[in-house]
Every structure is written in C-alpha cells, then in structure tokens.
C-alpha cells in the first residue's frame, strides 16, 4: 500500500521533496516505516531525531499504518 509522506524543514531539503508516496507492506508499523525511510534516504540518518505524525497526530513506533494514512516527517525545531 502507498503512504502519502510529507517532509518538512530540513527533512524536505535532505530528500529533495516535500511530498512522496512511499510503498509499504500491509500492517507496517511506524518503526518499519522509519527503516524504509533510512534505507531509501540514508541522508536522514544525519538528523539526531525527527518526529512522525500520522493523520496530524504524533505517532509511536508501534502504530500500524493503514491505507490512505498521511505521514508527516517533522524535524527538530529550535527557536531563539
């Protein structure tokens, strides 16, 4: 199944896209999705951390993705 993936901030710069469809197996978790991201886009490993939101809510690694979900990759934010 395809997951619409949105990239924000530095993550969009690193993958050179703000939006992609990423193919995952049914019953994939956020943890497995992160592994797919790191495999396809090893440059994301340069980030210390990033948050994942699914359908506009922060998601834990054990959340199971469903067809039609929208996943956002949110980099760390600092302010000043």
Image (spheres, helix red, strand yellow):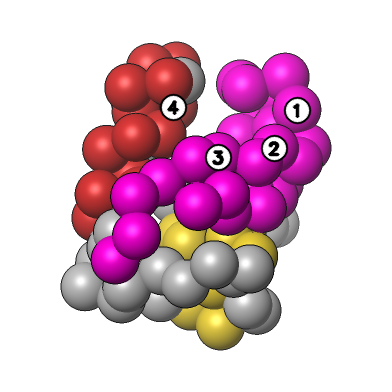
Alpha carbons under labels 3 and 1: distance apart: 12 Å
Label 4 sits on a secondary structure element that is helix
Q: Are marks 3 and 1 in contact (CB under 8 Å)?
A: no
The residue wearing badge 4 is 44
How many angstroms separate mark 2 from mark 3 (CA)? 6 Å
Spatial separation of the CA atoms under disc 3 and disc 4: 15 Å
Residue 77, given in percent of the width and then of the height, sits at 59, 54
Q: Position of residue 65 (x, y in %)?
A: 41, 69
Q: Where residue 78 sits: x, y (%)? A: 60, 54
Give the residue drawn at x 44%, y 27%: 44
Measuring 42% from the left and 20% from the top, which residue is drawn there? 40
Local secondary structure at mark 3: strand
Residue at (34, 28) in percent of width and height: 38
Find disc 2 in the rendering and name its residue: 20
Start and end of the magenta stretch?
1-27
Precedes in sequence: disc 3 or disc 4: 3
The image shows residue 15, relative to residue 74, as above or below, that is: above
Mark 4 or mark 2, which has the lower sequence index? 2
- CB within 8 Å, label 2 to label 1: yes
Depth order, front residue of 28/80: 28
Q: Are marks 3 and 4 in contact (CB under 8 Å)?
A: no
Residue 16 included in the magenta stretch of the image: yes
What residue is shown with label 1?
A: 17
- CA–CA distance in space, label 4 to label 1: 13 Å
Say what secondary structure mark 1 lies in.
Answer: loop
Q: Could you tell which of marks 3 and 1 lies nearer the N-terminus?
A: 1
Give the residue at mark 3.
Answer: 22
């Amino acid at each position: 199944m395809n997951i619409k993936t949105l990239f924000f901030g530095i993550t969009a710069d690193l993958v050179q896209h703000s939006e992609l469809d990423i193919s995952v197996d049914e019953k994939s978790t956020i943890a497995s999705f992160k592994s797919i991201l790191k495999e396809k886009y090893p440059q994301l490993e340069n980030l210390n951390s990033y948050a994942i939101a699914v359908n506009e809510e922060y998601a834990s690694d054990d959340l199971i993705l469903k067809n039609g979900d929208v996943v956002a990759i949110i980099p760390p934010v600092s302010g000043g």
